[in-house]
Amino acid sequence: MTTARINSQIAFLKETDHLKSVLRASRLIDDSRFENSAEHSWHVMLYALVLAEHAETPVNINRVLKMLLLHDIVEIDAGDAPIHAQVDRAAVETAEKAAADRIFGILPEDLRNEFRTLWFEFEAAETPESRFAKAIDRLPTPITNMEIGGGSWTDYDVTLDQLDTRVGTPIHRGAPALWAWLRPKLARWFAR
């Protein structure tokens, strides 16, 4: 039993190494290259840990960190679907659910169930933890894009109205103080 369990855990860990090869539309803050999804997952976890006090309601930060650690693992199979890209969102959702089944299915049953539950909770964004996790997932890219002169906004011809909907709505739902801090900065940047 122990050997089989460890074998499946290690198989999952080896599979998740592929997340390092999934490039995102977002660039690093030094604008030297595109970030990969593993780097993104690490960085949003750090954002959550540092900014947890700004959640709409108190959250279990350990649960938030687990969601953020797991939320993009499905990109190993489904790829990154940038929020500003014109993609078939229903097809992306279907591909991500299939990826969650396959990748989390490598694990022993207890971990498979726990991780799939956390992933679906994040996607649904109905609990305080998942709303905060979604908010934090949206926060780094606008900060980086302002720092580097537009970044992916330029690539996708993004407007402030689009940011209000695609970024502002989830941030405001999970961390309204962070949206209140970010929104004026965005308005000034787009007014330039």
Image (spheres, rainbow, N blue to C red):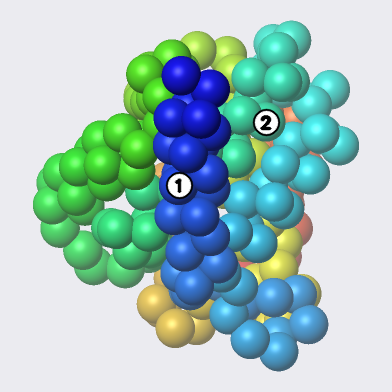
Residue 35 can be seen, yes or no: yes
The reply, left or right, for residue 44 in relation to residue 96 is right
Q: Position of residue 91 (x, y in %)?
A: 13, 52
Residue 187 can be seen, yes or no: no
Tell me the kind of residue under disc 1. Ala
How many residues crowd around disc 1 within 10 Å: few (fewer than 14), some, or many (20 or more)? Answer: some
Tell me the kind of residue under disc 2. Leu
Residue 65's tag is: 2
How many residues crowd around disc 2 within 10 Å: few (fewer than 14), some, or many (20 or more)? Answer: many
Q: Position of residue 121 (x, y in %)?
A: 42, 21
Quadrant holding the C terminus: bottom right
Residue in front for this viewpoint, 97 or 184: 97
Residue in front for this viewpoint, 64 or 105: 105
Of the residues tagged 1 and 2, which is closer to the observer?
A: 1
SS label for mark 2: helix
Residue depicted at x 74% and y 36%: 48
* Image quadrant assignment for residue 120: top left
Query: Of marks 1 and 2, which one's residue comes earlier in the chain?
Result: 1
SS label for mark 1: helix
Residue depicted at x 38% and y 56%: 75
User: Between marks 1 and 2, how big is the CA–CA gap?
Assistant: 22 Å
Residue 11's tag is: 1
Residue in front for this viewpoint, 190 or 23: 23
Residue 189's tag is: none
Q: Position of residue 112 (x, y in %)?
A: 39, 25
165 is higher (above) or lower (below) than 29:
above
* Image quadrant assignment for residue 181: top right
Q: Position of residue 20 (x, y in %)?
A: 55, 67
Residue depicted at x 71% and y 41%: 45
Residue depicted at x 41% and y 78%: 157
58 is higher (above) or lower (below) than 26:
above
